[in-house]
Image (tube, rainbow, N blue to C red):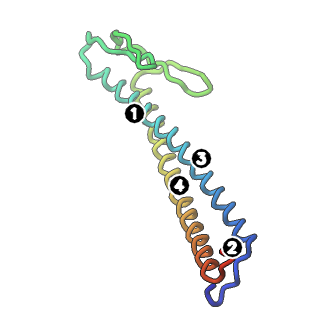
Amino acid sequence: MSAGRAPVTEQEVQEDLLRLDAYRNQLNALLQQHQILSASRQDHVRARESLEGIDRAPPSAELLLPLGGETFVRGSVDRDAPVLVGVGSGIVVEMERPKVVELVAQRTTRIEQALHDLEGQMTALDERIQALSQRLDSIARESGASSDVGSD
């Protein structure tokens, strides 16, 4: 033990171990949220690129329209037709394509901000995990050097 510091009790070590386990569980949950947000961001970017691609395509161009599950239908899009867009809770509304492009861009920006915030939380939590792990390692080394309890 270093001079000037009270010895660490078994209870404190157990509490630190529980805290470390909780931090790791929180980090895993944040990683899962990050994966979900990243997938959502990719979906929104693809949607925006597809909507913008319609404007660049010749008027009579045949397009592959995704149905999901890597299934497509050949077809053409009326450039003046409204776009159906989900607004939450299973509700879909019809909007003009420029408004949808704007809406999707706004959603993408919000998702990117949420990803940034989440990454900050993950970094802070990882720093706590590292500090607590180092503390526990230090305690283990000190207790191993000061006593040979449990060794025969």
Percent x, y for residue 109? Answer: 45, 41
151 w.r.t. 118: above or below: below
Q: Residue at label 2?
A: 150
For disc 4, the marked residue is 122
| Mark with earlier residue (3, 1) | 3
Q: Given contact means CB atoms under 8 Å apart, are the residues at marks 4 and 2 in contact?
A: no
Q: Amino acid at mark 2?
A: Gly
In the image, what residue occupies the spot 64% across and 78% down? 143
* Residue extending furthest toward the left: 58
Q: How many angstroms separate mark 4 from mark 2 (CA)?
A: 37 Å
Crowd class of label 2 (few under 14; some 14 to 19; many from 20; radius 10 Å):
few
Query: Closer to the camera, 144 or 14?
Result: 144
Q: How many other residues sit within 10 Å of disc 3, few (<14), some (14-19) or many (≥20)?
A: few
69 with respect to 1 (left or right): left
Kind of residue at disc 3: Ala
Q: Which element is circle 2 on?
A: loop
Residue 90 horizontal/vertical position (percent)? 60, 22
SS label for mark 1: helix
Whichever of callouts 4 and 2 sits on the residue coming sooner in the sequence is 4
Which residue is drawn at the image coordinates 34% and 10% (left, top)?
74
User: From the viewer's perspective, is the residue at label 3 or at label 2 nearer?
Assistant: 2
Task: Identify the residue under disc 3.
Answer: 29
Discs 3/1, front: 3
Crowding near the residue tagged with mark 1, few <14, some 14–19, many ≥20 C-alpha atoms within 10 Å: some
Report the residue marked by disc 1: 45
